[in-house]
Image (cartoon, rainbow, N blue to C red):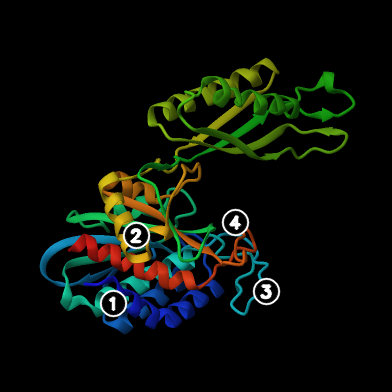
Amino acid sequence: MESKRIKDIAARIAPELIEIRQHLHQHPELSFKEEQTSVFIKSKLADRGIAFDDGYAGTGIVAKVKGKAGGKQFALRGDMDALPIQEMNDVAYRSTNPGVMHACGHDVHTSCALGAAFILHELRNEWAGEAHIVFQPGEEVLPGGASLMIKEGALSNELQGIVGQHVFPELEAGKVGFRSGMYMASCDELYFTVKGRGGHGALPHKNNDPVYATAQMVVALQQITSRNAPPEVPTVLSIGRIIAEGATNVIPNEVQVAGTFRTLDEEWRSKAHRLIEQVAKSTCAANGVEVEVDIRKGYPFLINQPELTARAKKAAKDYLGSENVIDLDLRMTAEDFAYYSQHMAGCFYRLGTASANGENSSAVHTPTFNIDESAIAVGTGLMAWIALTELS
């Protein structure tokens, strides 16, 4: 089968897929609450006569497109959830759900996965095997919908591998990026409750100040990355939330702190968790206060299986031209696709979504994120093409 055939079908169905993407964008739903999104996706699959199983992790769906008898099984993944962000884009399809927005492009991922299912179904008499299209809830929050779908048996043991894509506003639409091997970091959530004895701000000597101790603790925690982390292992520890409900003249009894720890090595990850607790407790003890430490282990690191990634990258070059396929750098962001990559051969690549004139380049997780919608035909066709090359 020639790639031009796939491109022609992708171009033909692109207007429908853009409508689907805009509908999803208008009606975003938060993680594990994608009820109407799930109903909408199932209606589109049913319209095409594509079989599916549902109910995984609540709202998850696995469509099963069957080709001719025999052959392999291969999976494509699209995530469905949105973020708690108020959209600021002035577009006709802006979010109608206050405080909820598809600011990470999951509406694009779902639309492309649907489009790939449509293409594979249309050509089902021309290839052998079975394509599983995974529509996954809850990528944005722990424990991650991917982990639950695996646990609940959504992925067949016969699957030869899985591919996913993610919007990339740093790259122009029409281009994609790949990286073999280690690609994205593990992600753990850090929570600290620093407890002291508050009182009048003018009488600190009569209090055990948890605010001052917290400041010391936040600074001390940075030694874990600067003085304990192996220099060859990328490591990030960031504190993003500190709540001390005092006043200009009131020292509170308690301070709440939250942050993230990310790395690319499991042995170091475990050691760092112990160090985080030790540093927090010893620093607070030195300042006469107590601290409760809660480390919530999140997504593992994401590894792109080298052989599958090499084949997918070659397929992308054949489909888009070598000049439109770039090499990616390591990222300290995290993705629950990592669970799939730990479970079977996986490849997670980036889909360019910026306009040639520089528009639609706002970062993901911002209220002005949007895409050049020509990327939808590219992402749809490429997912279908990669699946076909694997199934062949």
Mark 3 sits on what residue?
A: 90
SS state under label 2: helix
Contact, mark 3 vs mark 2 (Cβ under 8 Å): no
Give coordinates of residue 142: x percent, y percent. 46, 48
Who's the residue at 23% across and 62% down the image?
A: 389
Mark 2 sits on what residue?
A: 317
Give coordinates of residue 386: x percent, y percent. 29, 62
Res. 379 in view: yes
Foreground mark, 4 or 2? 2
Name the one closer to the observer, 382 or 333: 382
Contact, mark 2 vs mark 1 (Cβ under 8 Å): no
Name the one closer to the observer, 131 or 200: 131
Who's the residue at 30% across and 82% down the image?
A: 48
User: Where 227 falls versus 301 (above or below)?
Assistant: above
Separation (CA) of disc 1 from disc 4: 33 Å
Image disc number at residue 363: 4
Please state which amino acid type lies under the numbered disc 2: Lys
Mark 1 sits on what residue?
A: 5
Foreground mark, 3 or 1? 1
Who's the residue at 39% across and 74% down the image?
A: 41
Separation (CA) of disc 4 from disc 2: 26 Å
